[in-house]
Image: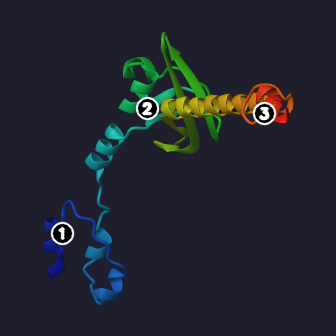
Amino acid sequence: PMWAHYANLAKGFVVVIDDLEHIFVGDNTGSLNKLKPVVYKDQFENIIAHISDGLLIIDQKGLIKFANPAATNLLEKDLDHLLNSELGIPITDSTEIEINHGFNLKNIELKSTITKWFGEDVYLVSLRDITSRKQQEIALYEAKEKAESANQANTVGAAGGGAGRGARGGAGAARRRR
């Protein structure tokens, strides 16, 4: 059909056309049945290679079958060391783990789900570095504890009539009463 020669011009574009049979009524050439889905292999590989979250594929035996570059960085292991090494069966939920490499402690959020990989049921595991967030949470908790302790000390000082902010009484009060 006449529209077929435009297919080569559309490389690299996503085109959504609904109900082609309706548009090309009477196309008995079978060309519509020969259209193949567009494969964006290079684009997906580029995304997987550059995403900041680590991705692992783990088989039913707990062996790592795939790791993207971010996973190798987070786990501080090279790809050859990770592939076919045993990680275990992940929890199909979200959890946090700590990885300690000498003086380098990392907090990692781990999420997993079950999917297919070459026809086999596997776990797709995402790893996200949450070290900075955890450090901020700890700093916030410590600041809150310090503020509560200071507030409690002021309250005790005020109730005891001794020195302290808001305390009633003391030497100044004695002088005024005379």
**Could you tell me if residue 103 is visible in this image?**
yes
Q: Nearer the viewer, residue 94 or 174?
A: 174
Residue, far bottom: 26
Q: In this view, does 100 lie above or below 42?
A: above
Q: Earlier in the sequence, mark 3 or mark 1?
A: 1
Left or right side of 148 for 177: right
Q: Residue 66 carries which label?
A: 2
Q: Nearer the viewer, residue 170 or 72?
A: 170
Q: What residue type is labelled 3?
A: Ala
Q: Closer to us: mark 2 or mark 3?
A: 3
Left or right side of 129 for 145: right
**Could you tell me if residue 61 is visible in this image?**
no
x%, y% of residue 67?
42, 31
Label pair 2/3, CB-CB below 8 angstroms:
no
Rendered-image quadrant of the C terminus:
top right
Left or right side of 11 for 15: right
**Residue neighbourhood size for the residue with mark 3, other residues' Cα within 10 Å, grouped as few (<14), some (14–19), many (≥20):** some
Assign a secondary structure to mark 3.
loop
Q: Earlier in the sequence, mark 1 or mark 2?
A: 1
User: Residue at left 32%, top 47%?
Assistant: 44
Read off the residue under disc 3.
Answer: 167
User: Residue at left 50%, top 29%?
Assistant: 131
Q: Which amino acid does label 1 sit on?
A: Ala
Read off the residue under disc 1.
Answer: 7
Left or right side of 5 for 113: right
| Distance (Cα) linking label 2 and label 3 | 66 Å
**Residue neighbourhood size for the residue with mark 1, other residues' Cα within 10 Å, grouped as few (<14), some (14–19), many (≥20):** few
